[in-house]
Image (spheres, helix red, strand yellow):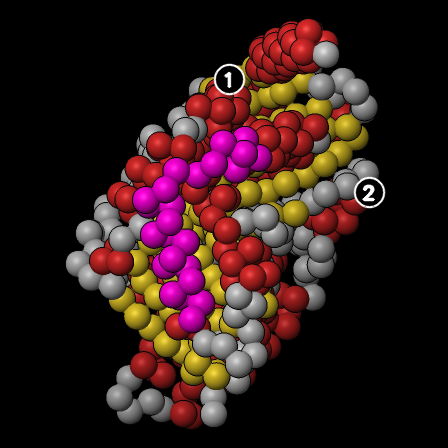
Amino acid sequence: MKRKWILAGSALLIFSLHVSGIQAQTFKHMKNRVKEKTLTNGMKWVVFERHDAPVVSFNLYADVGAANESYGITGISHLLEHMAFKGSKTVGTTDYAKEKPLLEEMDRLYALISAEKAGQHADTVKINAWQARFDAVQAEAKSLVVSNELIDLFDREGEAGINAGTNNDCTQYLNALPSNRLEFWMAATSDRFMNPVFREFYTERNVVIEERRMRTETQPLGRLMEDFFAAAFKAHPYHHSVVGHMSDLNRITRQDVIDYFNTYYIPSNMVVSVAGDVDAKTVFKLAERYFGRIDSGPKPLPPRTIEPEQWGERHIKVTAQSQPILLVGYHRPAGNHPDDAALGALTNIIGEGRSSWLYHELVKEKKIAIQCGAFNGFPGDKYPNLIAFFAVPAQGHTAQECLDAIDEAIARVRTEAVSAEELTKYKRSTKKGIIDAMKSNSGMARMLAEAEAKEGGWEAFFEAYNEVQSVSAEAIKTVAEKYLVRSNRTVGEIVPEK
């Protein structure tokens, strides 16, 4: 019987080594299918060829997000994302020659109205007259607009996933099309970024203002997040939310958006990743033809301000008609720091999923919370950020009880090594996530673009697998001792109104 177990163990070891070898070959094979090219204007292109189906996904990654904004224009990155769907000089209008002077007249009238309102003795007669003229010009300009023509154009060509998103670190524009529509995408997309027309600006700005009102100002969790970031980051631009401050949104002008676009939406500050049934040489040839004609300049500098060392624990409380919610964040370095992999493992083992320490202790055993968890790279990971923990206290229990339980878990990971089983489970689930991202064209395009922009090269995406594998229990303990200290944290909570 002992001999049988030895033989079985040997067979299992051989099988494991064989699978690992196959996996390594597969990764190497996939990596070899990635091709890159930098256009003459500095725009970086990354192409992954996969000919399983006649479809292709595109990810245009603009290396600009809320962290690039300054006081007075917070929220402009997100607003510009909205405006990028408004078309160009040829798409979205019946007559741009007539539309252009109307847009300029609206800007002129809006500037007069804003300046008069800002004065100490505003002349309401003038304001009303200018506003009436503004409304008339806006209506005339609206009559020349073909609403949603850009989106409809993509839909007619078989678009399956047009989308966009803005966060603190970047803005991404996503498309999925039949592979024989490659040149269509090149022509239409280069046009929207070479000849943008930010029409319907004041209408769309009102949409964003309403979005802020509904998601932040009238939502207890939105209020908590905004105040929490403002407390955790006293200097770095991560201190303001992606949607921006209401006063800024009310005052941002179309010219502000144009200036911001001209600064950050230049080829040297954009990466395009293409994944699917395409030929890399053809992609590069078309990219040079269509995107190579866009003028560029030096890549914009990142924010100068670096978040300084925190000198002591910070607390904020938001009073609202809500159940209590606790949020705790500890400062940590940027995502490209050597400690990142160990911090990811720490987050997963302590607070991600139903098998995590926090869920087991707070929800299942002590029953002091109805939900809890943890997340890493909060609110972004391009710059130094936070590792955060949250809990929703159960009825009859308090945020302080939950905070004490979180502190116990943190004290435990700082003094004890995580078990081999926990570490193995983390590595398996995380590596599975990496492999799953590779399965779809859209996932592959997203990961390649982010690695190229944030990590300094798309190759980092393939290296992530080995980084996860190399994480040790000792490394997890080390980062816990290093970063999870009280003087380095901010505690926020929602206090229910009596």
Q: Position of residue 395 (x, y in %)?
A: 56, 79
- In-image side of 496 versus 58 (left or right): left
- In-image side of 240 versus 291 (left or right): left
Towards the viewer: 315 or 336: 315
Q: Is residue 372 above or below residue 278?
A: below
What residue is shown at x 68% (from left), y 60% (from top)?
145
What residue is shown at x 25% (from left), y 63% (from top)?
313
| Residue where numbered disc 2 is placed | 156
Residue 407 magenta: yes
Q: Amino acid at mark 2?
A: Arg
Q: Quadrant of residue 59?
A: top right
Which residue reaches farthest front? 1
Q: Position of residue 454 (x, y in %)?
A: 42, 34
| N-term-proximal mark, 1 vs 2 | 1
Identify the magenta region. Answer: 401-425
Q: Position of residue 372 (x, y in %)?
A: 53, 61
Q: Position of residue 422 (x, y in %)?
A: 52, 37
Q: Residues within 10 Å of mark 1 (few under 14, many from 20)?
A: some
The numbered disc on residue 37 is: 1
Which residue reaches farthest left? 311
Q: Do the CB atoms of the residues marked 1 and 2 lie less than 8 Å apart?
A: no
Q: Quadrant of the N terminus?
A: top right
Q: Residues within 10 Å of mark 2 (few under 14, many from 20)?
A: few
